Amino acid sequence: MATDERPWLKYYDDIASDVVVPDVTMFEWLTATTQTAPENPAVLFLGTRLTFARLMRDIDQCAAAFVAQGVTSGDSVLVTLPNIPNVVVVFYALNKIGARAVMTHPLSSSDELKHYANETNAHWAVGVDMFYDRLQPVLDLPDMRRLIICHISDYLGAAMTVGFKLTKGRKIAPVPKDNPAVMSWADFMKTAGEPAPYVRPHEPTEGSVVLFSGGTTSLPKGIELSSHAFNALAASMIELIKIGAGQSVLAIMPAFHGFGLGLCIHSTLMSGATSILVPEVGTKTYIDALVKHKPNHIAGVPTLFQALLQMDDFAKVDFSQLRGAYAGGDSLTPDLKRRFDAALTAQGGKVELVEGYGLTECVTASVVSPAGHYRVGSIGVPIPGIRAMIVAPDTTNELPYGAEGEICMQGDTLMNCYINDEEATAKTLRLHDDGKIWLHTGDLGSMDADGYLYFAGRIKRIIKVSGVSVYPAQVEQLLSDHPLVKEVCVIGVPDDYQMSSVKAFIVPLDGVKPSDELREDLRQYAREHLMKWAVPRHIEFREELPHTKVGKVAYTELMEEEAAKPAVSSDGQAGQ
């Protein structure tokens, strides 16, 4: 296929011409949206309603507070927050002053948070009180200046605050007050001076956000994204899913994830719609939010939709108001789509579950299955503004329709770079013969004559556990440091609940006998240093591991062995 041919546009030709990416920063676009309807609800959170005007006032105050703390354009701030209003305020406040928001998982271990801070040269951090024990060690970094601690109650009304403190809040240990480097959200906001007249601090194409995901190796990489990339996604999604003022999106996908941040928060707010923030992921929480708020758009990973179907209360949810349902973060099986679509229809819905494919390197979804044109086994067609091609792996040579090769993407949502890794950036962002930069995804797939893409597997060693990326090399490195481990290899295995779970093959140190006690000791060791999704659910002891001719562990042989086995039954508590 010639690269200037885009057969998939026939599915989106009615909206493609309407997709215009504004030449503004994210903060500037939010400002313009606010001016159109300042009193419309921007954020709903546990009974609290923030209008666009209130949200902008808090963003301005937060930006001024960051400036008072010494944060300037080009600086990085580590943000490790769940879906609470503070994360929205911080994200756009940092964009206003030109600082980079380094968005990380609030359940990240202390070691991981230190790595993220070091990689991005972050001297400030914002976290939440319930995870203070993980955050406190970050202050040991020589250049860390300030840790700002938020509380779930920061944006709750008086009654909800009392209720929260009497229930879940009772389980949260108080944050020590003897460290001058630690400041509460309330005290931090009080440091703000009068906001100075706004002057654009950087261009929309400059780095504004860092998300961590898999690059061209198995270790987590910092991915730098621009306002322009997020705005390009928003411009396309606003037209694609027809979202706008008066509508709402249930934002249960986390803000440290491109799917949650790019679609459920940024695209939603830019359209003038309402983002309903849900601070914790769980089936009961999700169902309660569906019943209470009746959102117009919902999103989630396949594991979540699978779990919902197993809940009796889910059958009672009314979907007559639903305008869109989106699955991403992992592959959606045809069977799960069929069953969830049937449930939507039975419960008054007039839409289908739509699958999206993308990478953090292009914010999030770049390929979406067109509504009403689903093809079994396909991940869909490129969204307006994105082009796709299949090339022979390790080349820029395009392959014909039907041939399997590496999936490549081109468009305005592409990352700027991998932080501190020019080699990996050059390998992933490549100049093609058409004179354009293409993103080499590291994923295998094919394209048919209508532009439908088919995902075949990952070239990169990434395990998707409930939609969360787990990096085998990181787990291997940790387990290799255990004093009783001689050699280790980590792979993903099929799982009927999580789609994939982590399995570690371990050769114990000479003289050490395999046992259940050793297995649990290794799991506990992993729990202390890794987020829960990376903790091996399965540990198999072996006398030796297969090796390649050059002496490396032949993980592909282990993957082939496991592929021949039936899927592992899971109770949904993997890695706990």
Image (spheres, rainbow, N blue to C red):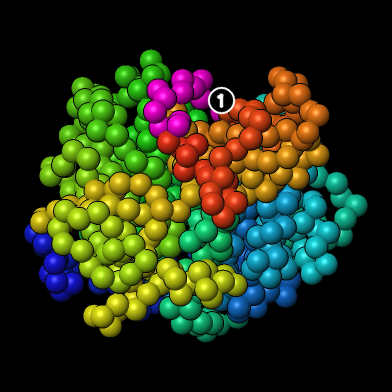
Query: Within the magenta stretch, is there residue 563?
Result: yes
The residue lying toward the viewer, choosing from 395 and 436, is 395
Q: Return the x and y of residue 360 as percentages of the image width and height.
A: 44, 58
Above or below 231: residue 518: above
Residue 477 visible, this angle: yes
Residue type, numbered disc 1: Gln
User: How many numbered marks have been drawn onto this rendered protein structure?
Assistant: 1
Secondary structure type for disc 1: loop
Q: Return the x and y of residue 485 as percentages of the image width and height.
A: 74, 37
Above or below 50: residue 63: below
Magenta: predominant secondary structure element?
Answer: loop
Residue 157 visible, this angle: no
Q: In which quadrant is the N terminus drawn?
A: bottom left
Please state if 473 lies on the left or on the right of 366 as rendered. Answer: right
Q: Residue at x 38, y 19 (%)?
A: 310
Give the residue pinned by disc 1.
573
Please state if 375 lies on the left or on the right of 51 as rendered. Answer: left
Quarter holding residue 118: bottom right
Magenta residue span? 561-576
The residue lying toward the viewer, choosing from 204 and 507, is 507
Q: Residue at x 73, y 40 (%)?
A: 486
Residue neighbourhood size for the residue with mark 1, other residues' Cα within 10 Å, grouped as few (<14), some (14–19), many (≥20): few
Please state if 509 lies on the left or on the right of 457 as rendered. Answer: right
Quarter holding residue 427: bottom left
Q: Residue at x 56, y 61 (%)?
A: 221
The residue lying toward the viewer, choosing from 410 and 285, is 410
